[in-house]
Image (tube, rainbow, N blue to C red):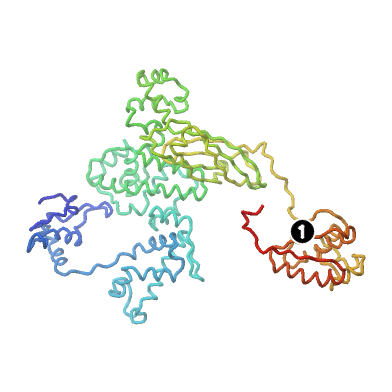
Amino acid sequence: LVCTATLAWGVNLPAHTVVIKGTQLYDAKAGGWRDLGMLDVMQIFGRAGRPQFDKSGEGIIITTHDKLAYYLRLLTSQLPIESQFLGSLKDNLNAEVALGTVTNVREACAWLGYTYLFRRMKTNPLVYGITWEEVIGDPSMGAKQRSFIIDAARSLDKAKMMRYDEKSGNFYCTELGRIASHFYLQYSSVETYNEMLRRHMSESEVINMVAHSSEFENIVVREEEQDELETLARKACPLEVKGGPTDKHGKISILIQVFISRASVDSSSLHSDAQYISQSLGRIMRALFEICLRRGWSEMTSLLLEYCKAVDRKIWPHLHPLRQFDRDISPEILWKLEERNVDLDRLYEMEENDIGALIRFSHQGRLVKQYVGYFPHVNLSASVSPITRTVLKVDLLITPEFVWKDRHHGMSQRWLIIVEDSENDTIYHSELFTLTKKMARGTPTKMSFNIPIFEPHPPQYYIRAVSDSWLHAESIFTVSFHNLTLPQTQITHTELLDLKPLPLSALGNKAYEDLYRFTHFNPIQTQAFHVLYHTETNVLLGAPTGSGKTISAELAMLHLFNTQPDMKVVYIAPLKAIVRERMNDWRHRLVTQLGKKMVCSIPSFLPPIHHRA
């Protein structure tokens, strides 16, 4: 049985003799050739002499002379496997905090105690930087365990991936930490983005920042690749390459642009590096887009979303939108459209014959017009109504205006709805809207949400619907504030005046004065006294607990006793205990001293709130 290095790991057929010829493999992650690991050797040798098929087996390694002693030692010594978890402790701790399974240092220590790292720390502490003095002083490794967690928490706090309260030991996840966990960003990459990511960046600066990601730190520059890299930089890179092909990050920038340009690579090592970069590129771009969206950076959010789609579709944003149908439309037609600078809006208005004459393929005009109709487009209309002077309610209508084809659109399309103030480069609202095939039949879909507005009022906001997967699929609606009428600025509560407290004698009735044990009304009662005791004006009195609201209500009751003694007073309270307290108090004062009658009505059953009229 003979198989290539690619298949050697997957073949599971038994054999008497297994021969491994050549022990070096190219590892793009390591940035070069590496030796075959002992675990891989043992796995491949495991096919020799299977118990059910043979009584014995043979394993042969053919390697270079300088590696002979290395493999002999590994095969005969059987060294224990040590944990590599410390190198990724920050990333894993952040993932647990983002998930909510770890919320403080104590829980983090318990979580670390379940790992293979902790088991090896107790068995072989010297490998993990633990001295014998520390082992003797702390045999359970609790202090060292806590030290690892606290160091990782402080690093994550510094990178703004979570908040660590030193006093309480609690962990609080941040948006940046959630994004890093969701998109598997390394801690060191987040540190790089914190340093390099700005509110305004050019396209080449964005590519250069992505090239600095720690996911690509093992990519190396090789002398034999320079000629091909220079050729690729000239022919396949529309953006400036910072550092050039001789620089490590310049090489990564070239390979990123080569991937988007769909250019071919001849060198096997360059091809492996390009493949390795392409595996993480889309994930990193999406993470950067989410970071800018959460920070509310309008310009950078739009730029990064464009490049997310460019990476997914391997099409540059400056190319014609119909290139996304390049499987059905010939390159010659697409090139003609780009040469004549014909955008989609113009193609929408043109007839089939006019399009055919423009591209000088008369019989292809119908095809182009057909695919213009397939291109995703939605129409937006919105109405704005003020809730307060600082909050507006937006009712948005989204009407699809394209022909749905399952082959191109699948079962649903995601659109990002953004409300932005372009003058301040700020996003005030964003949410995802999923457009299904059923909804795409032309029926408007309504969305409602609230947005803030600030003084001084901007001239307008822009509502944008941007496709999550199609380049240049975008609609804009302008919300003008020129004729917007907002509620008047007014004080929502009555100011408490600095008045001289009224004495009880203001009641003008000795029987009423005997009801109370104090001599003067408090400031709230003093200010409301005239309205309550001398008028029949409706009053809504809101005041803190213990400020005399019940006595204020009694003033209105006394006014009724003076003017209409035959009328009834209804007192309503939310709790039975409050009702009983009022009954006991008023039975002693109003019933006994004033001779009034009082009846209490407490229902034995109250229906649920949603059943009440």
Depth order, front residue of 357/247: 357
Q: Is residue 341 found left or right of 33 in the rendered image?
A: right
Examine the rendered structure and indicate whether residue 10 appears above or below residue 154: above
Q: Secondary structure at mark 1?
A: loop
The amino acid type, in three-letter code, at marker 1 is: Leu
Residue 316, horizontal then vertical, whole percent? 38, 37
Examine the rendered structure and indicate whether residue 59 appears above or below residue 201: below
Count neighbours of disc 1 (C-alpha within 10 A) and say few if under 14, some if 14 to 19, many if 20 or more.
few
Examine the rendered structure and indicate whether residue 48 appears above or below residue 426: below
Answer yes or no: is residue 300 visible.
no
- Residue found at x 39% / y 47%: 208
Q: Is residue 132 found left or right of 162 in the rendered image?
A: left
Residue 117, horizontal then vertical, whole percent? 32, 69
Answer yes or no: is residue 216 visible.
yes
Q: Is residue 567 found left or right of 544 in the rendered image?
A: right
Choose top left, top right, bottom left or bottom right for residue 238: top left
- Residue found at x 45% / y 36%: 438
Choose top left, top right, bottom left or bottom right for residue 493: bottom right
- Residue found at x 28% / y 74%: 124
Q: Which residue is mark 1?
A: 541
